[in-house]
Amino acid sequence: MNEARTIKVALLGAGSVGSQVARLLLEHADDFEQRAGARIELIGIAVRDPEAPRDVELPRELLTTDVERLILSADFVVELMGGIEPARGLITRALESGADVVTANKALLAHHGPELFDLAERVGAQLYYEAAVGGAIPIIRPLRENLAGDRIDRILGIVNGTTNYILDRMHTLGDSLEESLRIATELGYAEADPTADIEGHDAQQKAAILASIAFHTHVPVERVHCEGITGVTAAQIAEAERSGHVVKLLAICERIGEAVSARVYPALVPAAHPLASVHGGNNAIFVEAAAAGPLMFYGAGAGGVQTASAVLGDLVSGARRHVLGGPGTGESMDADLPIVDFAEIRTSYQISLAVADEPGVLASIATTFADHGVSVATFEQSPADDEGRATLVIGTHEAAEGALRGLVEALTAIPAVDRVAGVLRVEGVNR
Ligand code: NAP
């Protein structure tokens, strides 16, 4: 081992995650020195307002607004500000100055990952991002390193704790989506503006990151089809339970022949699937690999101190590399597999229709399914209400999204069909 030395760390951000990273680094400096083989010295913490009150008390002399100067004195820059700019510019400057970077910034990586990875490779620096997906759960390193000798066929991820909390509450307590969201906000599971979570954008960014690593192929976030949970109704949750399923918002990354797909939507998962038992705000990533078989990575997908664990893991392992030398692990995006158009994705569906309970309705619906090449697997009709309206829940065999889209349009045009009340895909079944 080389002579023990000091590794200088600049922390950008002291919010939920950054303040915990700073606290743990300061409290456990001796342990980290032993594990890394070098003293990990926190040389400064960039914030917007050094005087702002903070949950964690941090030495005032470490807080600074001079982020540029801080970066230039560091061996490691830990970016925990979030957002695209100035994080992107600062990480670029850090890498160009020869520093290694640790970040938890999924938005930045999903939108600008390739340019940052290219830059890191060009300048011989490392860019670590374990905390960007799944918070405390180790998933980036397992995919990049432990499973590098295997072929990943599919990933089904519950990667957003807010939406899992909401859907779980709808299942366990029978609450509406609005009520569940209100409680989630009250308890701090949802942010004041929950759009990125409930519209699926947060999961979409994570799906882009996971698919890119798993398939060694850059999957741009714009190519990840995304539907959130805002359309999920209490009636659909009840129907899911009747048919032996649980509704989960899934980030799905799939190898389809010699191509790949990444998509996000609420889906029916069989109640016996391991993902069905992921409750509350937890996350889980279910990986199907050719040789390893199914693996599940489970735990806290967010939280300041939990996420700090993943950030510090990157930091200690990066510090060890500084001490021991040797090449780092660059990104391998060389497979360059084509991305399947969403219209070609095949799954089975559960379609809920609000209809008039009158003669001939079933026949016209059955004909419409047949015309669009979607075959019916199961069928359930609720008793008609006082106004003669009933709900039909139709399960289908596998069909392409394109066919489904045409079918839904045609069903809507049938006079006796009031509306297509909902469509959920079925995932987590052998195909
Ligand atoms: P946060 O609580 O909003 O904290 C952001 C911090 O960055 C604050 O300390 C803020 O300074 C500082 N900051 C923002 N813009 C700045 C600028 N222009 N110059 C200097 N400082 C600036 O964020 P967070 O929840 O800790 O999240 C940090 C990152 O971790 C994000 O990328 C997020 O996606 C990721 N992440 C978070 C979690 C989680 O559970 N929170 C989980 C996984 C990943 P002030 O304190 O002065 O305002």
Image (cartoon, helix red, strand yellow):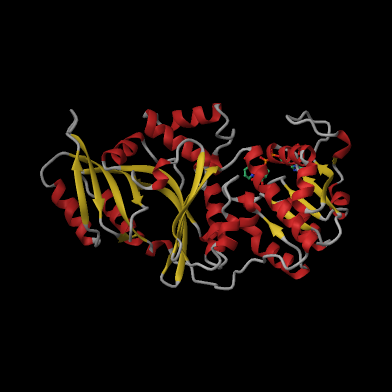
User: Is the residue 387 above or below the residue 77 in the image?
Assistant: above
Quadrant for the C terminus in the image: bottom left
Question: Where the N terminus falls, by quadrant?
Answer: bottom right
Residue 379, horizontal then vertical, whole percent: 19, 47
Q: Is residue 238 left or right of residue 37?
A: left
Instruction: Tell me if 327 is positioned left or right of 376 in this view.
Output: right
| 259 to 32, vertically: above or below | below
Closer to the camera, 404 or 311? 311
**Which is nearer the eye, 181 or 247?**
247
Q: Position of residue 93 (x, y in %)?
A: 80, 58
Q: Is residue 294 above or below residue 246?
A: below
Q: Residue at x 37, y 53 (%)?
A: 428
User: Which quadrant of the view contains residue 318?
Assistant: bottom right
Q: Percent position (x, y) of residue 215?
A: 52, 66
How far across and down, in percent of the image, does residue 185 sit?
54, 30
Pick whichever, 392 or 346, lies toward us: 346
Left of 213 or right of it: where is 304? Answer: right
Q: Residue furthest left?
A: 359
Q: Residue at x 43, y 66 (%)?
A: 290
The answer to whether any part of residue 83 appears in the image is no
